[in-house]
Amino acid sequence: MNDFGEREQDVRAVDVVVVGAGQAGLSGAYHLRRHGLEPDRDFVVLDHAARPGGAWQFRWPSLTYGKVHGMHALPGMELTTGTADDSRPSSEVIGAYFTAYERRFGLHVHRPVDVSAVREGDGGRLLVETSEGTWSARALINATGTWDRPFWPRYPGQETFRGRQLHTANYPGPEEFAGLRVVVVGGGASGTQHLMEIAEVAADTTWVTRRPPVYREGPFSEERGRAAVALVDERVRLGLPPLSVVSVTGLPVNEAIVRAREKGVLDRLPMFDRITPDGVAWDDGRTVAADVILWATGFRPAVDHLAPMGLRERGGGIRVEETRAVRDERIHLVGYGPSASTIGANRAGRAAVRDIRRLLGREPASV
């Protein structure tokens, strides 16, 4: 028996456990396989969703593939133009692509599997406790993303609101808001997309953000992209909670944005001070009546299962060098901070496997 009451024969041993089968997790699994590690013998991929598609499978139906900002193909397999029909829901297009990718490379993702904790094991190994049992590993690629941790701000009077409150994570599409008065909170890409759709059918919409929105005119150059990633990377290196890459790139000005600005849909109000039973209010006396408050306020990294490893810094985040957790070189975070974009996730998967191969090349600690 070990410290956690597990019999040794109940713990399955592999070299690497990959947690999450979204863009970053599949990228990591691909590079593990490419370097000669075999699924279910040398590494295992665990995913909590019942089917392939990562967080994309949960996106609202009106988010068609043509509205997606910068989806990059996974390594080794292009997302072809024929498959990527701009008019189809992104959840369908990318879900089908991820399904085909897993099959092509024989990744054999275990699902649905929930990972509850990662702990220190014997002999320098990690114990990964899951709903299908415990895995022992020499290294971990954590690719859990953010979708499972929607961020809900708290404001005075929030519990008194008689209408409906929901988050982007539960956004059903614009049809359910027909004829209603809707307050949309959040200045990111999701908030503006929700707002512009809902404004077509709602009785009234109000857009509220903490800071004035920043619009990005013209193409998004490679130089601007590197600058945005550098801002996120600096926070992660300091052990602060990461910002999303999207949050520092600004809102791209496309035709839909131009039309919405001309119609006044994107006339923004500063953040309200409290919520009332019938809407929202500011300390200067202004009020807005509402039937719905939609919180497009982003997500936080889903890393609570890593808590037993003590990786968090005093600033509240996990300090990461490239993808490696500074406090534990066996743990790699991909799709975290600067690698939270689709192209960043691909690069992070490759970088994590490069470091893990070096780690696996060493002699394991004696038991």
Image (spheres, rainbow, N blue to C red):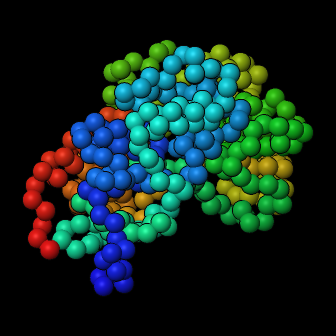
Residue at 68 percent of width and 39 percent of height: 60
Considering every residue shown, the one lying at the far right of the view is 179
Give the quarter of the figure containing the N terminus: bottom left
Residue at 26 percent of width and 56 percent of height: 15
Residue 307 as seen in the image, left or right of residue 182: left
Give the quarter of the figure containing the C terminus: bottom left
Residue 362 as seen in the image, left or right of residue 302: left
The x, y position of residue 345, in whole percent, is 38, 38
Residue 125 as seen in the image, left or right of residue 78: left
> Looking at the image, can residue 97 be seen?
yes
Vertically, is 162 above or below 349? below
Residue at 42 percent of width and 59 percent of height: 303
Residue at 79 percent of width and 43 percent of height: 182
The x, y position of residue 12, in whole percent, is 34, 66
Residue 116 as seen in the image, left or right of residue 165: left
Vertically, is 219 above or below 145? above
Task: Count every numbered label the image shows and give the total.
Answer: 0
The x, y position of residue 28, in whole percent, is 34, 42
- Which residue is at the front of the view, 104 or 354? 104
> Looking at the image, can residue 234 be seen?
no
Vertically, is 16 above or below 352? below
